[in-house]
Amino acid sequence: MAAAGFYYLKRGDVVRCIFCGVEVGQWVDGDDPMVDHRKWSPACKFVRSPNSVGNIPIEEGPTEDDNCGFDTCGPYGVIPSPNNSKDEPLNLENLGVQKSHPPSFPAYSTYESRLQSYKLWPISLKLRPEMLSDAGFFYTGIGDKTICFHCGGGLKDWEETDEPWVEHARWFSKCIFILLMKGKDFVDEVSGKKLLQNFKDNSQKGHGLSSSTSDLEKQSASTEMASTSLCNNRNDDINDDVNLISGSCSKNNRGNDATLCKICYMNDVSVVFLPCGHLVACVRCAASLTACAVCRKPFTATIRAYLS
């Protein structure tokens, strides 16, 4: 990173060029810092000519640490498992738990604030600002460069056929916002981290039951007799039915209020804050929060919840 002109900002994995100021994050294995530097800031003087800015290159060679030993007994005297000495730690992300951190640009945490940034969006560009805003991007006012409010990742050179959600997942697969909104399975498929699953065989179909004519006649006769008895008691039951319906409606209204997001009161709650465990926000609102809306305690991780 240093050899490519970057220094660490102590925010996620975001680094900044000391010469041009461009910020780059969401690094993955195999990335070449200099290639990404040239991609996002081709006009940088350091990228164009490293020797012209007074840069002192890092000398590559043996260091004092080359001959350092390493611990073979494990940290803190932990005895390896007799069955498998190479057990890997539990990956919470595979269980749906996402580590949380504050948005890089909290001023654009809401859909409305992001949409407002597109007032000067070039008319010649066919991709709609609504789609970009929905996918977490706000407009920088330069060309067609957009930035995700949460992870800080930037994308440009948009084409009419591009799908913002897909491009977001492809380039910034660690973004908390897209993981909350779309889920890990979607991100993994788009970013190529897992093979597409085969469609399940849906050839089995339910078979309907048929009734014979005689059965229908018996049912008709039985229904006629029952209807006569029902009519005699109908007037007495009407008041009870009205009271029952009224009570059910009241319970449903209370239930609906209980499942609404306590931030926007529009969507259902669907994110659990950890470690407090409160379920009070929808995915969109949760992505913009840094503390639980109930206990006001900062949360360090989130998990999606699905109400049945």
Image (spheres, rainbow, N blue to C red):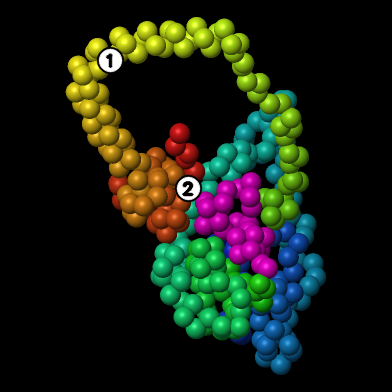
Mark 1 surroundings: few (<14), some (14-19) or many (≥20) residues within 10 A: few
**Taking 25 as reference, is 53 above or below it?**
below
Helix, strand or loop at disc 2? strand
Q: Which residue is at 36% across, 41% downward?
A: 259
Residue corresponding to mark 2: 301
Q: Which residue is at 46% across, 63% downward?
A: 103
Residue range corresponding to the magenta coloring: 161-187
Distance in Å between CA atoms under marks 2 and 1 = 60 Å
Label ID, residue 109: none
> Looking at the magenta stretch, what is its main secondary structure?
helix
Residue corresponding to mark 1: 231
Q: Kindly identify the amino acid type of the residue bearing the numbered disc 1.
A: Cys
Q: Is residue 175 in the magenta section? A: yes
Mark 2 surroundings: few (<14), some (14-19) or many (≥20) residues within 10 A: some
Q: Is residue 11 in the magenta section? A: no
| Number of marks in picture | 2
